[in-house]
């Protein structure tokens, strides 16, 4: 076993592995669906942490299967390390909101371009809010009562998107303007990750 300092990304992988063996691909998919909207993981991070945790004895690698995918299982040491991490005081959130960074320097952005940015991102957040609300409405009452932790996380996402969409609505007309894209058309709306509860 080698000395290894458990970080939040690795700890989240251990958390998911409590549900059973998973490959790096499975973990990446699970993370994107379950925590992708508030905790970013890249494929390279996932595989790097899996390799490090295997060397540290926190997980065990199984036999490779189809497409050379290898399942990992959490060990007793991994469960202990996760229990220690999850009980620690979490740090404060770090906000990285690219649109706000543009808005700070909005006087240097052509008005039609800025309003296009606003319209584009407002559409993303409204679509994300609708998606979260649809997920919430589809969850059986029995599941809600039995899984308050994941439901509370989903509810935070709903409240956050409600606040952001309200902020968009209240922006001064000088900022909102009439959105025009690069070619005279509104910028396309892209979907964000879906916050999907683990059932």
Image: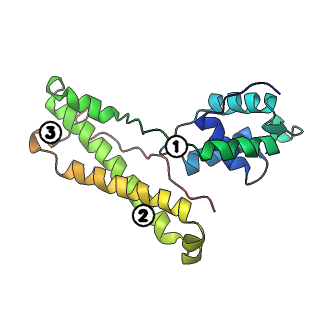
In which quadrant of the rendered view does residue 180 lie?
A: top left
In which quadrant of the rendered view does residue 106 lie?
A: top left
Distance, label 1 to label 2, CA atoms, is 30 Å
Does 148 sit above or below residue 6?
below
Q: Position of residue 7 (x, y in %)?
A: 61, 33
Q: Nearer the viewer, residue 95 or 131?
A: 95
Disc 1 target residue: 89
Quadrant of the rendering where the C terminus is positioned: bottom right
Q: Position of residue 82 (x, y in %)?
A: 68, 44
Q: Residue at x 71, y 40 (%)?
A: 81
Disc 3 target residue: 175
Does 118 sit above or below residue 108?
below
Q: Which residue is drawn at 57% across and 51% down?
A: 34
Q: Which of 118 and 11 is in front in this view?
A: 11
Q: Which of marks 3 and 1 is nearer the N terminus?
A: 1
Q: Earlier in the sequence, mark 1 or mark 2?
A: 1
Q: Residue at x 64, y 48 (%)?
A: 30
Q: Which of 165 and 182 is in front in this view?
A: 165
Quadrant of the rendering where the N terminus is positioned: top right
With 104 as the anchor, is 63 left or right in this view? Answer: right
Does residue 25 appear in the picture of this structure? yes
Disc ID at residue 182: none
**What secondary structure is found at the residue carrying circle 3?**
helix
Q: Where is residue 49 in the image (x, y as percent from the top left)?
A: 69, 31
Distance, label 3 to label 1, CA atoms, is 39 Å
Disc 2 target residue: 133
């Amino acid at each position: 076993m080698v000395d290894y300092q458990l970080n939040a990304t690795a700890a989240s992988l251990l958390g998911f592995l409590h549900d059973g063996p998973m490959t790096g691909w499975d973990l990446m998919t699970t993370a994107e669906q379950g925590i992708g909207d508030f905790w970013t993981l890249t494929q390279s991070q996932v595989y790097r942490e899996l390799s490090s945790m295997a060397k540290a004895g926190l997980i065990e690698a199984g036999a490779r299967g189809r497409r050379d995918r290898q399942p990992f299982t959490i060990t007793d040491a991994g469960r202990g390390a996760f229990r220690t991490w999850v009980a620690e005081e979490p740090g404060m959130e770090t906000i990285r909101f690219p649109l706000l960074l543009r808005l700070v320097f909005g006087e240097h952005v052509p008005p039609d371009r800025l309003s296009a940015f606003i319209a584009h991102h407002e559409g993303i957040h409204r679509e994300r809010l609708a998606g979260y609300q649809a997920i919430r409405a589809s969850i059986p009452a029995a599941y809600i009562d039995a899984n308050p932790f994941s439901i509370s996380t989903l509810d935070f996402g709903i409240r956050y998107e409600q606040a952001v969409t309200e902020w968009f609505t209240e922006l001064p007309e000088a900022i909102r303007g009439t959105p025009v894209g690069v070619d005279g058309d509104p910028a396309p709306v892209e979907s964000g990750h879906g916050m999907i509860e683990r059932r």
